[in-house]
Amino acid sequence: MLLVCLLSLSSTVGARKVSELVERAKAFALEAHKGQKRLNREETPLATHLEEVVSLVEWSGGNETEIAAAWLHDVVEDTPVTLAEVAANFGNEVASIVDGLTDPPEFKNLHTLERKIAQAARIYTEIDSVKRVKLADQISNVRSVVVDPPIRWDAQKCLDYVRGAEMIAWECKDASGCLYGKFLNAYNDAIKIYGDGFRPTAG
């Protein structure tokens, strides 16, 4: 597994020039998400999350379409941008990946674990390109929950999120064993904090 990951890394990073498609997707996403921050103590700019997801997709050997979609993966869900606009600017292939990464409206009212279960069921049917970006997204999100979770989340909600993320990652694991390994590292770090022996506190 390590050799495969290293070969993928050596073939995609360093020699690769950033494509015009990826540059446009980056600029579009950063403008669309301008001013948005995570609701954690550090108020981390959402751009930091996008950059981490893109870096992971690149590291795993993702192609330019997947990298462009990684920049854009939250743009329909979290900004006024529509899927039609994504397609018009970046083509149907990128838009299809972004669509697979965007929750349907009915997911928004679900509780954390219910929503993650629904996401896992949906991602199971998606193509590997969607799964690769989703794995990178879950790695970044779980890492964030470990180091600086949303200020309104108690430990139980963090645990529910992390366990739900593991369900999603399991459905995506065959798209990139390298990324799945990184996810398991983040997941294990989170379980050490929120898992074994945890009991929710009153209030």
Image (spheres, rainbow, N blue to C red):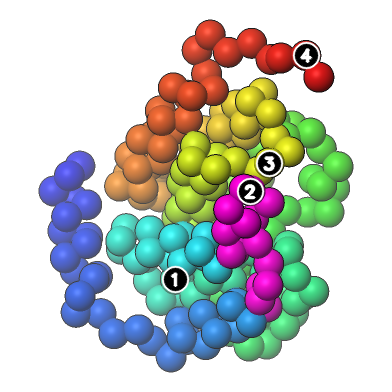
Report which residue position mark 3 lands on: 151
Question: Counting other residues with Cα less than 10 Å from the Cα at mark 1, is it few (<14), some (14-19), or many (20 or more)?
Answer: many
Residue closer to the observer: 86 or 48: 48
Residue contact between numbered discs 1 and 4, judged by CB atoms under 8 Å: no
Range of magenta residues = 32-46
Name the amino acid type tagged 1: Ile
- Disc 1 is placed on an element classified as helix
Q: In which quarter of the image is the C terminus?
A: top right
Report which residue position mark 4 lands on: 202
Question: Counting other residues with Cα less than 10 Å from the Cα at mark 3, is it few (<14), some (14-19), or many (20 or more)?
Answer: few
CA separation in Å, label 3 and label 1 = 30 Å
Name the amino acid type tagged 4: Ala
CA separation in Å, label 4 and label 2 = 22 Å
Question: Counting other residues with Cα less than 10 Å from the Cα at mark 2, is it few (<14), some (14-19), or many (20 or more)?
Answer: some
Of mark 1 and mark 2, the one earlier in the sequence is: 2
Of mark 3 and mark 1, the one earlier in the sequence is: 1
Asked if residue 139 is among those painted magenta in the image, a careful observer would answer no
- Counting from the top left corner in percent of width and height, residue 121 is at 65, 38
